[in-house]
Amino acid sequence: MKLANKELIPFLHGAVRTVDKKDGFLALYRFTEKQVEFYKELVHPKKTLFFEKAHASSNIRIAFNTNASFFSFDYYATRAASREYYYYDVFVDGSLVHHQGEENVRIGAGTIRVELPEGEHQVTVYCPPLFSTAVANFTLSDGATISPVTKKRRMLILGDSITQGYDARFSSQSYANLLADKLDAISVNQGIGGETFNPGMLDFDLGFTPDIVTVAYGSNDFTKCTKEEMIYNANEFYRRLREAYPNAKFFSVLPIWRIDCVKTYAMRFEEAIEISREAALKAGSVPIEGLKIVPNMREFFADAKVLHPNELGFNFYANGMYNVIKEYLDEN
């Protein structure tokens, strides 16, 4: 039983729009056309990379319940960040059963096929955070049933490269995916590697209203912005967000440790943290102490620059956020 592209859409989480391609594939996007156009026109030394990163499939999932004996689909993945690897993770009933991707490529293509045990199961396919994703020929065993996975909450996740998912080779283990799972939330991840507090990137025509908004900037502002620029941008960013989502619960992760935090750029690292904290508090957002949630040790970071957590670091990040957020959930 093969699903047409339009029949697959109810099973997508985290995609704000889809586009049918001439080759029969369905491209999945986490940014609106307006936002992609903003990054295309952005005057920035690395504006092309920003534009590419806006096409990455961070936090996009295919999630469904089925009694099928197998499912499969074709994909192609195109580099959308300054990395040349991509991986898809497949979970069945909360357990990782399949991990597929490639290293040292700019474009990848393949077929994912997973055999399923007898009975009904919940399946989640996590798309790569640093490559774009397009899918086709989604197929289940003949006569199988399929239904959408429902979630308790809706969450908008905003931030920089760490939020986008650098450098998780297991896509499911980025902090944004881990946190969404802990909160039982459908999440739209609009993290962009290299981004700062940037009010111009916001678009509220996302097709949903979030219950929770998380914000995690400040690390790039520390190296790229003056104090005056950061103060203005952070406050304007939060003003627009709060005006758009007056009833959402806001949580702000203050910058986590980075190995060069002892340096002074246009400001000291401690100043970037305090500017982030003050802007968050002014908007009624709960600050989360980044320096306390991820251990300040190389071993918890993946890249040579010691900027991006590895999977272990991301688990600390997600757990630290969840431990704060859970105290503000309605059931508490």
Image (cartoon, rainbow, N blue to C red):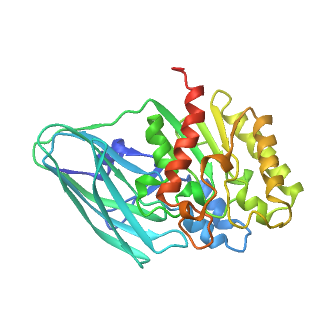
> Which residue occupies 51% across, 20% down?
331
Q: In this view, does 71 lie to the left or right of 20?
A: left
Q: Is residue 260 left or right of residue 159?
A: right
Question: x and y percent of residue 295 in the render?
Answer: 60, 53
Total number of numbered labels?
A: 0
Residue 187's place in the image compared with 19, above or below, is above
**Residue sticking out furthest to the bottom:** 104
> Which residue occupies 46% across, 46% down?
178
Q: In which quarter of the image is the C terminus?
A: top right
> Which residue occupies 51% across, 61% down?
310
> Which residue occupies 80% across, 35% down?
282
**Residue sticking out furthest to the top:** 331
Instruction: Work out whether residue 131 or residue 306 is closer to the camera in this orientation and state it.
Output: 306
Question: x and y percent of residue 140 in the render?
Answer: 17, 50
Instruction: Work out whether residue 324 or residue 249 is closer to the camera in this orientation and state it.
Output: 324
Q: Is residue 91 left or right of residue 246?
A: left
**Residue sticking out furthest to the right:** 228
Instruction: Work out whether residue 49 or residue 98 is closer to the camera in this orientation and state it.
Output: 98
Residue 171's place in the image compared with 42, above or below, is above
Instruction: Work out whether residue 124 or residue 262 is closer to the camera in this orientation and state it.
Output: 262
Residue 295's place in the image compared with 332, above or below, is below
Question: x and y percent of residue 25 in the render?
Answer: 33, 62
- The answer to whether residue 44 is seen in the rendering is yes
Question: x and y percent of residue 16 in the render?
Answer: 49, 47
